[in-house]
Image: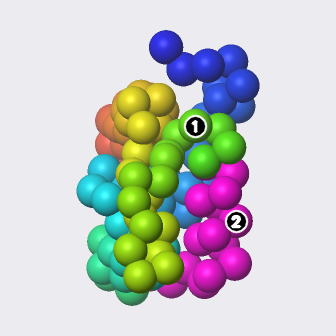
Amino acid sequence: MVKKKNENQIPMTETAFYILLSLLQPRHGYAIIKNVNKMTDGRITLGPGTIYGTLSKMSQSELIQITAEENNRKIYQVTALGKELLELERKRITELYQNAKEAF
C-alpha cells in the first residue's frame, strides 16, 4: 500500500510520471533524459536541474533507489513503492481518458 506521505504525489506531474516510467529499467540521469525525449517524440526535453532535482525527491520518498554506480554515474531504478504509485497514476490517467472518450 502506498505510504501516507506519498499519497500527495497523485496526480503526478507529467515529468515525474515519465521519469518514474523510465526507471522501470535501470538508467542513469542522461539515459533518462534521452528515454523521456524518445517516448514523447521530442515533446519533453528534460534539463539536468529538473532531472536531478526530481531524482533526489523520488529517492527521499523511496520511489526509486540507486542500484549501482558506473563511471561516476548513479544508476537508478524504481522501487516496489514507486511501481505501485506508477500503477495508481496509470489507472487515474486511463479513467480520465475513458471519461473524455465517452463524453465526445
Task: Please give the label number shown on residue 53.
Answer: 2
**Residue 55 is one of the magenta-drawn residues:** yes
Q: Distance between the residues labelled 1 and 2?
A: 14 Å
Magenta stretch bounds: 43-58
From the image, tell me which residue sits under label 1. Answer: 62
Q: What residue type is labelled 1?
A: Glu
**Residue 93 is one of the magenta-drawn residues:** no
Position in image of residue 102 (x %, y %): 33, 35
Q: Is mark 1 on a helix, strand or loop?
A: loop
Q: Quadrant of residue 37?
A: bottom left
Position in image of residue 29 (x %, y %): 48, 74
- For this orientation, the residue located farthest to the top is 1
User: Horizontal placement of 73 versus 102: left or right?
Assistant: right
Q: Using the image as rendered, state which of residue 104 and residue 15 is in the foreground.
A: 15
Crowd around label 2: few <14 · some 14–19 · many ≥20 (10 Å): few
Q: Using the image as rendered, state which of residue 68 and residue 90 is in the foreground.
A: 68
Task: Please give the label number shown on residue 74.
Answer: none
Q: Which of marks 1 and 2 is nearer the N terminus?
A: 2
